Image: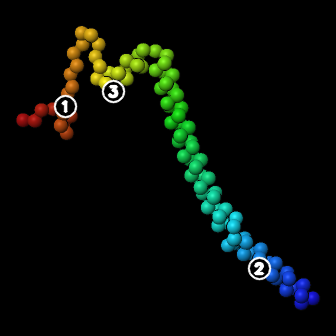
């Protein structure tokens, strides 16, 4: 009887060790759950960013209006007969100081 009790206690101790301190313990499981949540959030942000980029690509492929707007904003291009003015202002929004 004592031998059986000793075996059961040893088995219980071994299982408790694996549960709390060993590989695939509860602490590891909680840590992995947190990593999964963070990765899912990151994935959601990347999916949203990819969708915006797909829409921009589609817009650029479908018409010249978006292409023209991008050329004007990013490259400073102007149409023939237009005059380009760049207004450089201070903190007051371009209002000249006295």
Q: Which residue is mark 2?
A: 13
Image point (15%, 32%), residue name? 95
* Disc 1 residue crowd, few under 14, some 14–19, many 20+, Cα 10 Å: few
Image point (32%, 21%), residue name? 72
Of pointers 1 and 2, the one earlier in the residue sequence: 2
Up/down of 22 relative to 73, above or below: below
Distance from disc 3 to disc 2, alpha carbons, whole Å, reads: 68 Å
Q: Is residue 4 left or right of residue 92?
A: right
Q: Nearer the viewer, mark 1 or mark 2?
A: 2
Which of the colour schemes (rainbow, by chain, secondary structure, one colour) is used?
Answer: rainbow
Of pointers 1 and 3, the one earlier in the residue sequence: 3
> Farthest right residue?
1
**Quarter of the image that includes the N terminus:** bottom right
Q: Is residue 15 left or right of residue 5?
A: left
Up/down of 15 relative to 55, above or below: below
Instruction: Name the element at disc 1.
Output: loop
* Disc 2 residue crowd, few under 14, some 14–19, many 20+, Cα 10 Å: few
Q: Which residue is mark 3?
A: 74
Q: Which residue is mark 1?
A: 88
Image point (53%, 34%), residue name? 50
Image point (12%, 32%), residue name? 96
């Amino acid at each position: 009887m004592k031998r059986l009790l000793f075996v059961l206690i040893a088995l219980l101790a071994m299982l408790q060790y694996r549960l709390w301190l060993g590989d695939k313990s509860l602490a590891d499981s909680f840590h992995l759950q947190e990593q999964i949540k963070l990765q899912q959030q990151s994935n959601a942000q990347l999916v949203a960013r990819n969708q915006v980029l797909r829409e921009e690509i589609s817009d650029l492929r479908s018409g010249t209006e978006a292409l023209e707007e991008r050329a004007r904003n990013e490259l400073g291009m102007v149409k023939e007969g237009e005059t380009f003015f760049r207004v450089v202002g201070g903190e007051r929004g371009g209002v000249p100081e006295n």
